[in-house]
Image (cartoon, rainbow, N blue to C red):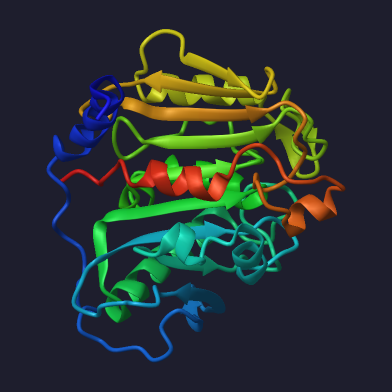
């Protein structure tokens, strides 16, 4: 074994085990048997007097007595959870053989934040609270390992979720892609802990959510650099990030060292210069076809899952 290559990986693993994971959370769903594992199941719940829907995907070899990490995937505007599931392939065993994937649906195909959204931040936060409560009562979930990813409007809502100390505090890490961060900058942002691990993906050629910020479809958006700066401050990251460039200088990976036992690389960012408003994938997907693009250099599905595996919600 190459010891020099092994030591960094070992240090990242130790960053997880240095934190005592949260042992709470409802486990009443453990032991309940569900038919057709490996297929997506659909649920309708009432939240604040309105019927709303979400879907959930269990591993093919789901063990009802074993607690699983849970990943919520948030669709973009004018969409639903099913489309996000199909576009990202997150339910495929290659990405989530050891995780439960859950896809919430926004009201009228959008999430709170932009001016075109029907719901409020409070409504959607309550919806996520209700989803988690229901999912834990039906499925065997490890509450120390609950994560969220999303694209565009859904990625932007993750920012509001990460800034919430109650519902947002249920999550161990976030991974938005092409996020439209309409609620930034927001002095009311109060994350549940430091660091609040975040991995962000964005295209330098995004024509819908501009990397430089400015007027978006639903309001004014910050530049991605400014947005990262806000989270670097909140996570008490030290100095400038480490930057690694690849693919002839077209791909840039920024890694911040932040506060606490889980602070090493707790804030990360991937910028792909020639990528537009898509879910980053090395295989052709629907968002790339819609944008008139082809596969990109990185897989957000793979990188997000690897990022999640590093973090637990502290006790």
Residue extending farthest front: 1
Q: Residue furthest top?
A: 239
Q: Is residue 185 visible?
A: no
Q: Residue at x 79, y 30 (%)?
A: 205
Disc tally is: 0
Q: Is residue 45 above or below residue 296?
A: below
The answer to which of 162 and 285 lies nearer the viewer is 285
Q: Is 293 positioned to the left or the right of 71 in the image?
A: right
Q: Is residue 6 left or right of residue 270?
A: left
Q: Is residue 235 visible?
A: yes
Residue 24: image location, x then y, percent: 16, 60
Query: Which of the 4 image quarters holds residue 98?
Result: bottom left
Relative horizontal placement of residue 80, taking residue 25 as reference (left or right): right
**Quadrant for the N terminus in the image:** top left
Which residue shows up at 74% across the image and 37% down it? 209
Residue 100 image point, x, y percent? 39, 67
Outermost residue, bottom side: 35
**Nearer to me, 302 or 43:** 302
Query: Where does the image place residue 239, in percent across and percent down from the top left?
Result: 41, 8
Q: Residue furthest right?
A: 292
Say left or right for 132 vs 226. Answer: left
**Residue 298 sits above or below residue 237 on the image:** below
* Quadrant in which residue 276 is drawn: top right
Residue 156, above or below 210: below
- Looking at the picture, how far across and down is residue 138, in whole percent? 31, 81
Q: Residue at x 51, y 66 (%)?
A: 92
């Amino acid at each position: 074994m190459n010891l020099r290559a092994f030591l960094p990986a070992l240090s990242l693993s130790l960053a997880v085990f240095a934190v005592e994971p949260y042992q709470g959370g409802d486990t009443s769903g453990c032991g309940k048997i569900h038919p057709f594992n490996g297929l997506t199941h659909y649920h309708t719940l009432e939240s604040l007097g309105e019927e709303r829907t979400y879907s959930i995907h269990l591993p093919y070899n789901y063990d009802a007595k074993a607690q699983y990490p849970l990943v919520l995937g948030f669709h973009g505007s004018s969409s639903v959870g099913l489309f996000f599931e199909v576009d990202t392939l997150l339910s495929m065993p290659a990405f989530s053989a050891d995780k439960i994937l859950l896809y919430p649906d926004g009201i009228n195909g959008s999430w709170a934040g932009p001016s075109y959204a029907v719901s409020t931040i409070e409504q959607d936060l309550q919806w996520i609270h209700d989803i988690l409560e229901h999912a834990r009562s039906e499925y065997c979930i490890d509450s120390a390992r609950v994560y969220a990813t999303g694209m565009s409007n859904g990625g932007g809502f993750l920012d509001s979720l990460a800034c919430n100390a109650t519902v947002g505090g249920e999550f161990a890490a976030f991974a938005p892609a092409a996020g439209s961060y309409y609620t930034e900058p927001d002095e009311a942002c109060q994350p549940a802990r430091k660091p609040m691990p975040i991995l962000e993906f964005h295209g330098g050629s995004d024509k819908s959510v501009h990397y430089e910020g400015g007027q978006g479809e639903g309001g004014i958006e910050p530049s991605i650099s400014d947005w990262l700066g806000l989270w670097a401050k909140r996570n008490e990251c030290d100095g400038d990030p480490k930057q690694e460039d690849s693919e002839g200088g077209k791909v840039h990976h920024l890694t911040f060292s932040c506060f606490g036992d889980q602070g090493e690389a707790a804030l990360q960012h991937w910028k792909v210069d020639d990528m537009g408003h898509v879910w980053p994938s090395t295989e052709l997907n629907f968002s790339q076809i819609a944008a008139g693009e082809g596969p990109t250099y990185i897989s957000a599905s793979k990188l997000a899952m690897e990022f999640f595996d590093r973090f637990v919600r502290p006790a």
